[in-house]
């Protein structure tokens, strides 16, 4: 089992912090469950602070990250884990996912049955991070089965002869969701369920919004360095307006049912370079990146916004 080692916060995450501020991680950088590292990832200071505080001392809590789609909830966790050599057991939740699948189950192997531990059991035993992505899509009665182990109580696997797993001191439970456990009032996220109050009471909750313009500009520039800065600025303006209409302005109902996440923004920029010889390249790339899956009226509205922002750049190449 990998041993713990301290990491200097300022150099590990490339942020301004006291030189003596450290956080514990693991010494083994070759564990297969360590997430891939994205060099140049820009950490938002307040979010980094909150996650590191939780990793340092969970205090019997889980950590719930809530925010709009594509705001970077999961990538925040995985990029912190990548720099701390912290193995991750990641599960994408859905309405038919059962607690037993997280704990483990018997499988047929060479004519005999064998118990295979699930991501929850492995994470608790080895001190990994358990990430429950889209957790608010899962049946709340199943998630409530995690209440005891989040608080640090042993995991008892009755199906495996009453095996008892005492949680490793570094074991952490983290969940993401587009809601904060109270259901989706916007109607934009199909399948989101109101979660059990006792389950949510075991979580610290942090809000992850879209990055600032400066951070998103840096992300796009890093992904597509050949794209002119003027074009990146115009793409950012379009993205901001789409998000404003998606989230609803001044307590009005959302005018759009699609939004431009950071990953969609990068996709648009990348496709603009890929199809740079096409007529109306920015419109063509935007359609593939986002609007082809929007309703016709919404697609037209988004393209009007982009045309106004891009001006002559939106017109077919001469």
Image (cartoon, helix red, strand yellow):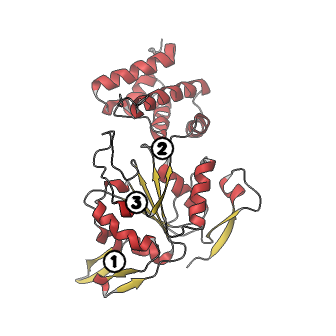
Write the residue at 31% across / 31% down: 294
At horizontal 42% and vertical 80% (from top left) the residue drawn is 154
Q: Quadrant of the N terminus?
A: bottom right
Please report whichever mark, 1 or 2, sits nearer to the chain's N-terminal start.
Answer: 2
Q: Badge 1: how crowded within 10 Å, few (<14), some, or many (20+)?
A: some
Label 1: state its secondary structure: strand
Residue furthest toward the left? 111
Which residue is at the front of the view, 262 or 154?
A: 154
- Tag on residue 116? 1
Q: Which residue is mark 2?
A: 71
Is residue 15 or residue 181 the one in the foreground? 181
Kindly indicate the quadrant of the structure image that contains residue 212.
Answer: top right
Looking at marks 3 and 1 on the same chain, the residue that comes earlier in the sequence is marked by 1
Residue 96, how many percent across, how many down? 25, 60
Q: CA distance from mark 2 to mark 3?
A: 21 Å
**First along the sequence among labels 2 and 3:** 2
70 or 313, which is in the foreground?
Answer: 70
Q: Are marks 1 and 2 in contact (CB under 8 Å)?
A: no
Residue drawn 40% across the image and 31% down it? 251
Give x and y (percent) for residue 127: 51, 73
Residue at which label 3 appears: 200
Number of the front mark, 1 or 2: 2
Instruction: Estimate the x, y position of residue 272 in percent, counting from the top left.
Output: 48, 29
Compared across the picture, whether 169 is left or right of 121 comes to right
Residue 20 vs 282, above or below: the answer is below
Q: Residue furthest right?
A: 19
Check disc 2 and report its element: helix, strand or loop: loop
* 273 sits left or right of 147 in the view: right
Mark whose residue sits in front, 3 or 1: 3
Callout 3 environment at 10 Å: few (<14), some (14 to 19), or many (20+)? many
């Amino acid at each position: 089992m990998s041993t713990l080692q301290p990491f200097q916060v300022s150099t590990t995450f490339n942020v301004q912090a006291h030189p003596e501020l450290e956080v514990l991680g693991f010494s083994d950088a070759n564990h297969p469950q360590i997430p891939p590292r994205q060099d140049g990832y820009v950490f938002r200071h307040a979010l980094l602070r909150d996650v590191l505080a939780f990793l340092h001392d969970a205090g019997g809590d889980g950590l719930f990250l809530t925010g709009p789609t594509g705001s970077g909830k999961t990538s925040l966790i995985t990029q912190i884990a990548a720099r701390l050599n912290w193995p991750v057991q990641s599960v994408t939740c859905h309405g038919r996912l059962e607690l037993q699948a997280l704990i483990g189950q018997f499988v047929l192997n060479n004519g005999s049955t064998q118990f295979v531990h699930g991501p929850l059991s492995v994470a608790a035993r080895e001190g990994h991070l358990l990430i429950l992505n889209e957790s608010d899509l899962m049946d709340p009665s199943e998630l409530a089965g995690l209440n005891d182990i989040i608080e640090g109580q042993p995991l008892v696997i009755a199906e495996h002869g009453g095996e008892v797993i005492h949680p490793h001191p570094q074991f952490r439970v983290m969940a993401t969701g587009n809601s904060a456990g109270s259901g989706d009032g916007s109607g934009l996220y199909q399948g989101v369920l109101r979660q059990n109050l006792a389950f949510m009471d075991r979580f610290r909750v942090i809000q992850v919004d879209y990055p600032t313009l400066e951070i998103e500009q840096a992300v796009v520039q890093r992904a597509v360095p050949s794209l002119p800065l003027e074009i990146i600025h115009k793409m950012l303006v379009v993205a901001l307006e789409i998000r404003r209409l998606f989230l609803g302005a001044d307590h009005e109902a959302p005018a759009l049912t699609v939004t431009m996440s950071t990953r969609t923004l990068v996709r648009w920029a990348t496709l603009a370079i890929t199809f740079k010889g096409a007529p109306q390249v920015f419109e063509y790339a935007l359609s593939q990146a986002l609007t082809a899956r929007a309703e016709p009226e919404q697609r037209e509205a988004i393209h009007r916004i982009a045309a106004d922002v891009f001006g002559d750049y939106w017109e077919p190449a001469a």
